[in-house]
Image (cartoon, rainbow, N blue to C red):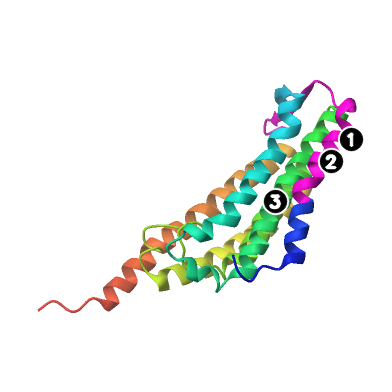
Amino acid sequence: MKNINWKKEFVIWLALLAPFIYAFIMWGKIPDRVPTHWNVKGEVDDYSGKTFALLLLPGMNVLMYFILFFIPRIDPRYQHYRLFGPSYQNIRLIIHIFFVGIFAFTIHAALTNNASGFNFFMAGMGLFFALLGNYMRTVRSNWFVGIRTPWTLSNEEVWRQTHLLGGRIWFYGGLVIAVTCLFLPQVAAGIVLAAGIGVMALVPVVYSYFKYRELVKTTSPPHE
C-alpha cells in the first residue's frame, strides 16, 4: 500500500507489541482464571484461562493488522484508497489502540478483582466511535471500509452524503456517549451506550436508502 506514513506505522507496531511484553512481564502475577465478560452492572459473569485471556486479544489485534493492511490490495476499488490513505491509516491506528484498551481493562479487572473502571471503559467506547466518525467523512467508495449498503455502493453521491452524515453522527454521538457514561450509574450508562450505538448504526443506513431513492427519482427520465 502506497503513501504510508512509516512513523505512524511504527506507532501501530508498538501498540501491537506492547500487550505481549506486558503479558510476559506480568504472567506470574495474573491469576489462573481471568474475568473476560461483564454484565451491564459491571459484574463479572464469565472467566477464561490465563493463557487464553492474555493472548487472545493481542493475537486478534495482530490478525486484524494484516487484514486491514492487505484488504486494499484485493479491493476492486483499490485506486480509491489513494484518495483517503492518511485517513485509512488513522482508522487502523484507532482500531488497534482500541484493542489495546480492551486488553488493559481486562488485565486491570484481573489484578484488582473488580470492574470499578467499567464506566471509563464505556466512555472509551464512545470516544472510539467519535474518533472513527472524525475520519469517516473522508472515506471514499470501497468494498471493505465505511458504511457499505446496497445504496452507497451503487451510487458515489449517496456514498459521499451518507458518510458526511454518518461521520457527524458518530463523532458527536460518540462524544455524548463518552461524557454521559462518565457520570451516569453503570446500568444507565450501559443503556446509553447500547442505545447510542444502535442509533449511530441505523440512521446512516436508513438515510442511504432514502437518499438513493431521491437521487434516482431526480435523475430518471420522465415517463412518456
| Quadrant into which the N terminus falls | bottom right
Residue 190 placed where, x, y %?
Answer: 67, 41
Whole-Å distance between the Cαs marked 1 and 2? 6 Å
**Which residue matches tag 3?**
96
Q: Is residue 32 magenta?
A: yes
Residue 176 placed where, x, y %?
Answer: 68, 57
Q: Residue at x 89, y 35 (%)?
A: 25
Query: Tag 2 or tag 3, which sits nearer the N-term?
Result: 2
Q: Residue at x 73, y 49 (%)?
A: 123
Q: Quadrant of residue 56?
A: top right
Whole-Å distance between the Cαs marked 1 and 3? 21 Å
**What secondary structure is found at the residue carrying circle 3?**
helix
Look at the image and tell me whether residue 183 can be seen: no
42 or 188, which lies in front? Answer: 42
Q: Residue at x 44, y 66 (%)?
A: 77
Q: Is residue 187 left or right of residue 20?
A: left
User: Crowdedness of circle 3 by 10 Å Cα count: few (<14), some, many (20+)?
Assistant: many
Mark drawn on residue 21: 2
